[in-house]
Structures are given as C-alpha cells and as structure tokens.
C-alpha cells in the first residue's frame, strides 16, 4: 500500500491531497479552514484533514510531493530581473527577502511543517503537476493534455500526451508570454483583483462590445496560427514593477486603470468583452494545433485559464476534439493532486485505476470534510440555534417547498467540494424561474456586484431540455446556450439598451440563470455522485415541472466557501438567507435568536 501526500503552497490557493494506491482519498484548500481567501501559507489544516480522513499518520507516508520546483522558479526570477535592470529595483527588493529567507528552502520548510518528516520528498514542475491533475483522473485511457496559466517556473502553457500511466510533455510556451498574464492584466486594468477577479471579467464581458479586439491583436500580442504568441512587453509592468500594466498600455486603451469599487463604465465592459474574445481565439488555436500534432480525440485541460468556462464551451462546440475533460481544481490547488498522482504513476510506474462506471476518478470533486448529524447538532445546541431534525425524505420535501416560495436556502451536505465551485454540498440555492432571484442573491446574500451571473444545477437526464448541451458538465466548467424555445425575445426598446441596463431584462423562462447573451454556466447533477442533491432537484421538478436550481457558492464576497456547520450558520445569520439546511437539520431565519457578536464561535465548533 503506497500513501502519497501532495502539497501546493506559498503562492496562492494552498492545498493538500492524499492519494493511496492511486485512489484520491482526500483533498482540500487551506482557505476553507483558515477562512483567509486564497490562503498561500503552508496547508497545515488541509494536511491534517487529509491524514485524518485516510486514518494515516505522517510516518505512514511513503512520499510527499510538492507541486513545483522553487529553485527553477528562482532562476527565472533572477534572470528576469537581470534582463530588465536597472528597472525593477523596487520589485526586486520586495521579492528577495521572502525568497532568501523562505522560498529557497521550501524543502526544509515542508519537513519542518510536517513535524520533522524524514521520508522521501519530491518536486514536480508546475505544469507537469497541472498536466497530471488533468490526465490521470480523467475518464480517458489516452488523451492530449493542454495546460494554460499565468506562469509556473518558466512555462506559461504546455501540451503533451497521456497514455495509460505514461504522460509526456511535448512543448511549452515560456514566460513572459502568458495567456494567464494577459487576462490578469485586463483584470487589473478594469479595476478587479488579480488572481481572484478574473471571474468578474468573464461575467462582465457579455455586457460589452468587443471593440478593442483588433487593437489587442495589433498592439498587444502577436498571435500565430498555432496559438503561440508574443506579448508586447512595453505595455506590461509585471516584469519589473508592482503593477500589471504600464503607462503605454493606458495610453492605448484610453486612460488609467479603473479605481477598484468605482462605477463600471462601458469602457470596462468593452475591454472585458475584447480580452475574452481574444482569449477564446488563443485557446481555440492552441487546441487545433495540439490536435494536429497529437492526433488524439480526447483533450484534458488544467491551469488557471481552464477555469474560463466560456472558452471551454467554445472548445467543446467549435474545437477539433470529440471529448473534453477539465480538472475541477484547475488552478494551483489542483497541483497538490497532480503531483501526488504523478509520483504514483510516473515515478513509481503504477497503472491507473479505472472507474467501473466509465466516469472520472474525482468522485464528483467531493473530497473534503463531512460532518455527522451528531456533530452538527452539538454545534447547533452550543450556538443556541432553533432547528428541526427531519428524516431525509421530509428534509428534502421541506427544502424543495421553501425553494418554490422563492426562499433563498443555504445547503450544507456531505463532503466539501475541492476546487473553486460549489457543486451541491456547500451551496446557496434558489428558484431559477424567479425574475428577482439574481438581484436578491447578489445584493442581499453575496454582497457582490449586481452583474455577476448565477449558475444552474440541472438533472443530468434533463439537461438537453433546457440547454444546447447533451454531455456531462459535473464541475460547472462549461458554458452553453439556453435552448431557443426557452428564450424571451427582446422588444425594440430592450434591444437598444447598453451595458448594465441589460441586466434586468429577462432572457428566458429561467431568468435567474440566463446571462445577457442567452448563455448559462451549467452543472449537471448525477445520482451516483451526489444522490441527495439529485433527490432535491427531482423533488423540485415534481413540484414545479422545472429540473433546474440556482446554485451559487455558500459564502459572501471576500470570504472562502464555507467548510463547517459553524461557517454555514454564521453566513446564514449575517445575510438575508431564509432557510439553512445542515445535514438533517432545517433552520428558519425568522425563528433564530439574535446573533451575539461577543460569542466565541470558534470554541463552539472547531475542526482541529
């Protein structure tokens, strides 16, 4: 029996994963435990959880793997600074203390954090970890693999081929020419936070017109037919400065970056639309090149750019590959999973486990902690909450009925999801038929920008009734059009609307999940991976004839997705959610006592 712990840390989205004999036993991001969004520290809580879930001790580990190679990354950083000197001194002085004190000694730090671990410690290259996370859990015996992100050590994109236990990287695009950096530069320029605001740019894009596309393709990047490109580095500041874009960039696009939290203008919407179109074109050209070079029919994706579900949808519809599979934790967190699987298969030469149902090996991405009814009730009693405990069928019926009344429901069930999406275990749910649900959830629950779209969860067996998609999309990583017969035609006056004014115009009979371009980011729900959530959707369909629910992550703006019943209860009480369902327990907001700010909530329920 071989037990391998994979770790990603020290940049953003730290995580841990435990693999035993090729099976993914547990995986979680550190942010879920510390409640610090995108936590980049050593994932000690996630490691502790993974070991506990596996019933293992540190001395039981055969290998520990780290998801990238710090010395190779340091080489790139030094060469970068030498190449732009004397510019970049301030950035250099900011970066070097952390490297010289900590990151150069990552191996020592890992051993120290693991209590003096003396076993085997291996390092994979960053894009090798991404590629392994994409191919090895996929349902394919063989596939092409494409990875795209900001930067690892030197690589910013790569492609290769996986066959059985073998995975080979064939070519890569190198820093500073990076699709992830390009998108992040526009994220910064439009006033959002890099490494977290990219979703906002993607959601904002349909409100704009792509009028800057030609300018980007002419002045910003030189794009080749094979998807490779070079950025005009005079326009960017990330090589030598502390910001993403330069004054030359600002001159080309009509002014300085938008101030964060200031009013969005049509310019930002048009910029978002433009960089989204360019990103999709690069993705499509890369995919076509990989198909020509490999001859494969299947494609696996990972890296932060693979979270661009609009681009993924175009790859599925217009790309040359017959089948597409995307790692649900496609960003850096998934590197912890990738390095563990790379050690098991590439280093140790073990064959891949095959899923008997023909699906993938991610178990629906439900790889985090779960909580028993006894644990939940212990917390609820300590918190003084008012609740009812119901049998499963009654709990599902009560929840479905609340949703038909347009109530907003917090839903915590089973194991927490691994990756950035809530997939029906740590979710906030609503009725997609409601014309007011999107604004209610954005402004009163999530406390976020009103333009942000919500995703539909739909019974897999009914997905084609609602969307132009007839394949699995279990991880909410594909955008597809709403079926034409469900769309609502716009009036002449509505057609003349611009920007955010488009927001309140219903686009289909599922207005809360239909974006302004008649698209939706779809999660298909499967009875075998999440039977409870499937049962809830089934009951909602019986009551309403609708097999779809609004599903958004169980958190508020600026906070990670909830992990524990405590996290969920606090989020419920501090927002305008109507109902909370924790395991078998149903809580109604109107019946709850006032939340006392001076209560030591952490002492009432702690994971450690």
Image (cartoon, rainbow, N blue to C red):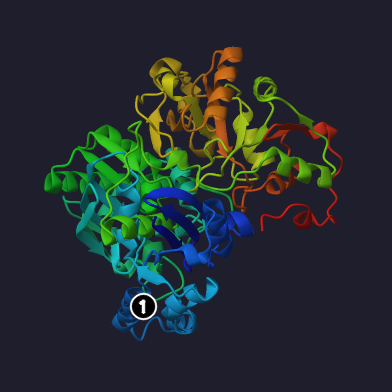
Against 338, is 67 above or below? below
Look at 85% across and 57% down and name the residue there. 598
Quadrant of image for the C terminus: bottom right
Number of on-image labels: 1
What x and y, as percent, mark residue 254?
A: 42, 57
Viewer-closest of 427 and 454: 427
Residue 174 falls in image quadrant: bottom left
Which residue is rendered at x = 43% and y = 42% of the image?
205
The residue labelled by disc 1 is: 74
Residue most toward the bottom? 86
User: x and y percent of residue 239 in the render?
Assistant: 36, 73
Give left or right: position of 15 versus 590.
left
Above or below — where is 366 with respect to 148?
Answer: above
Tell me where residue 556 appears, x and y as whole percent.
64, 47
**Which quadrant holds the N terminus?**
bottom left
User: Neighbour class for label 1 at 10 Å: few (<14), some, many (≥20)?
Assistant: some
Q: Where is residue 319 in the image (x, y as percent from the top left)?
A: 23, 37
């Amino acid at each position: 029996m071989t037990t391998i712990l994979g770790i990603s840390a020290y940049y953003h989205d730290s995580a841990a994963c435990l693999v035993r004999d090729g099976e993914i036993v547990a995986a979680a991001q550190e942010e879920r435990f510390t409640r610090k969004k995108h936590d980049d520290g050593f994932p000690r809580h996630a490691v502790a959880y993974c070991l506990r879930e596996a019933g293992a001790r540190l001395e039981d580990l055969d290998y520990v793997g780290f998801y990238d190679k710090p010395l190779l990354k340091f080489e790139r950083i030094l060469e970068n600074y030498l190449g732009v000197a004397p510019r970049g001194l301030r950035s250099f002085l900011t970066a070097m203390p952390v490297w010289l004190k900590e990151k150069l000694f990552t191996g020592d730090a890992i051993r120290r954090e693991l209590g003096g671990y003396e076993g085997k410690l291996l390092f994979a290259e960053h894009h090798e970890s991404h590629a392994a996370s994409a191919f090895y859990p996929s349902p394919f015996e063989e596939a092409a693999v494409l990875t795209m992100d900001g930067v690892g050590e030197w690589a910013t994109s790569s492609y290769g081929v996986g066959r059985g236990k073998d995975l080979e990287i064939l070519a890569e695009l190198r820093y500073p020419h990076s699709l992830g950096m390009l998108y992040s530069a526009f994220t910064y320029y439009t006033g959002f936070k890099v490494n977290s605001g990219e979703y906002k740019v993607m959601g904002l894009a349909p409100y704009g017109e792509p009028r800057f596309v030609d300018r980007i393709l002419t002045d910003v990047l030189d794009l080749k037919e094979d998807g490779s490109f070079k950025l005009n580095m005079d326009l960017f500041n990330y090589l030598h400065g502390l910001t993403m874009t330069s004054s030359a960039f600002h001159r080309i696009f009509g002014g300085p970056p938008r101030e964060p939290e200031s009013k969005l203008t049509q310019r930002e919407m048009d910029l978002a639309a433009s960089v989204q179109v360019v990103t999709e074109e690069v993705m499509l050209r890369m995919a076509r090149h990989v198909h020509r070079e490999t001859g494969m029919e299947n494609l696996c994706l990972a890296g932060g750019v693979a979270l661009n579900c609009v681009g993924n949808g175009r790859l599925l519809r217009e790309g040359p590959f017959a089948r597409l599979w995307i790692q649900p934790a496609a960003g850096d967190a998934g590197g912890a999973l990738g390095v563990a699987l790379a050690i098991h298969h590439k280093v140790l030469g073990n064959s891949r486990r095959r899923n008997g149902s023909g699906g993938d090996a991610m178990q629906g991405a439900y790889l985090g902690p779960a909580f028993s009814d006894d644990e939940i009730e212990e917390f609820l009693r300590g918190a003084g909450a008012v609740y009812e405990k119901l049998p499963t069928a009654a709990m599902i019926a009560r929840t479905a009925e609340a949703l038909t009344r347009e109530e907003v429901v917090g839903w915590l069930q089973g194991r927490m999801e691994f990756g950035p999406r809530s997939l029906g275990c740590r979710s906030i749910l609503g009725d997609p038929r409601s014309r007011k649900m999107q604004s209610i959830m954005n402004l009163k629950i999530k406390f976020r920008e009103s333009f942000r779209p919500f995703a539909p969860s739909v019974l897999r067996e009914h997905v084609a009734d609602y969307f132009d998609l007839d394949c699995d999309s279990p991880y909410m990583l594909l955008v597809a059009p709403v079926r034409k017969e469900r769309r609502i035609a716009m009036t002449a006056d509505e057609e003349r609307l611009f920007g955010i004014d488009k927001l309140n115009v219903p686009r289909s009979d599922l207005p809360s999940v239909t974006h302004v371009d008649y698209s939706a980011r779809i999660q298909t729900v499967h009875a075998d991976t999440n039977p409870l959530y499937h049962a809830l959707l089934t009951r909602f369909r019986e009551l309403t004839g609708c097999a779809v629910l609004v599903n958004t992550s169980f958190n508020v703006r600026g906070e990670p997705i909830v992990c524990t019943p405590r996290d969920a209860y606090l989020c419920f009480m501090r927002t305008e959610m109507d109902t909370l369902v924790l395991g078998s327990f149903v809580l109604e907001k109107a019946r709850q006592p006032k939340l006392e700010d001076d209560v030591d909530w952490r002492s009432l329920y702690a994971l450690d």
